[in-house]
Amino acid sequence: MPLTFADKSPRNAPQQVLDAAAICFMEKGYAGSTLDDVARHMGATKGRIYHYFNSKSELMHAVRKRAMDINFAAIRDGFDSNLPPAQKFRLMADAHALNMMAEQPYQRALFDSLHTHMTRDKAARHDAIMDEFIGDRRAFEDMFREVLEQGKASGAFRFKTLSIALHTVITILNSSIYWYSPRPDETDKDRRQIASELVDMAQRALGATTP
C-alpha cells in the first residue's frame, strides 16, 4: 500500500526507512516482516537500513515512537486552546480522526504491537520499552480524559462512567486504522467528512448535541 495523503513532502533518509517499515509492519505484522521486506519496499538494500537502525526491534521502536509523537502533536493545539470543553473535544477529536487516516501505517503498527504485548501472559509482559509506550498511551488518553471531565462538570456531556466514555470515544476515533482505504480520486474534503462523521458519533456517545 502506498503512503497515505500525509506523505506529500520529501522525507529524509531515516524517515524513508521508517515509512517503509511502518507499511511492512501494517501489511505483514511485525513477526511476519523482515528487514529484506523493508529494503525491497524502499528499492534499496539492507545496508541502507543498517546505516540508521541496528535491528528490526530497534526499527519497530522508532516506528512506535514516531506514531506517538504524531498523535500528541495532532491534538496539542486543541488541548491547549481556551475553548469550552465541548468545542475543545471536537477540535481534538477531529484532529485525531484525521491523523489516524493520514498516518495509518504508523498507527496500525503501533496498535497491533500494543495489542500483541497486552495479550501475552503477564509474566512475559516485563518489557521496559513497551512499558514506556503504554505510559505514553495513557498520557495521551489522559488529555482526552481531562476534557471529558471538564465537559461533564459543565453539563456539556452527559455520560455516566468516565472510563467507559473515554474508551468508547477513543475506539470510535481510532477505528479507521482498520477499515480506511483511500480512493484514487479521494479529496481532502472527503477525508474531513469521514472524520466529521466519526466525531459526531463520539459526541453522541458522550451525550452531547452535535453542532
Image (tube, grey):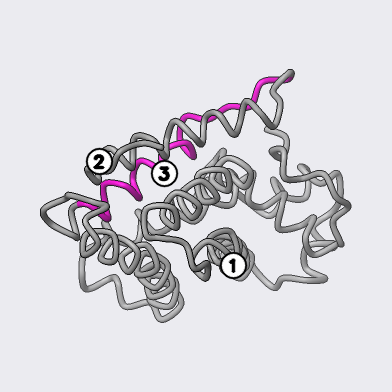
Gap in angstroms between the C-alphas marked 1 and 3? 17 Å
Which label's residue is closer to the chain start, 1 or 3? 1
Label 2 vs label 3: CA separation?
12 Å
Res 69 label: 1
Q: Residues within 10 Å of mark 2 (few under 14, many from 20)?
A: some
Q: Which residue is drawn at 33% across and 41% down?
A: 202
Q: Is residue 122 magenta?
A: no
Query: Which secondary structure class fits the magenta region best?
Result: helix
- Residue 171 x %, y %: 33, 45
Residue 161 in picture, x, y percent from top left: 12, 56
Residue 205 got which mark? 2
* Residue 76 location, quadrant: bottom right
Mark 2 residue element: helix
Q: Nearer the viewer, residue 79 or 177?
A: 79
Q: Which of marks 1 and 3 is in front?
A: 3
- The crowd level at tag 1 (other Cα within 10 Å; few <14, some 14-19, many 20+) is few
Alpha carbons under labels 2 and 1: distance apart:
27 Å
Query: Does 6 sit left or right of 103 as displayed?
Result: right
Residue 40 image position (x, y, % from top left): 78, 43
- Magenta residues span 165-184
Residue named by callout 3: 173
Q: Specify the quadrant of the image occupied by residue 8.
A: top right
Callout 3 amino acid: Leu
- Which of marks 1 and 2 precedes in the sequence? 1
Q: What residue type is labelled 2?
A: Ala
184 versus 114 height, above or below: above
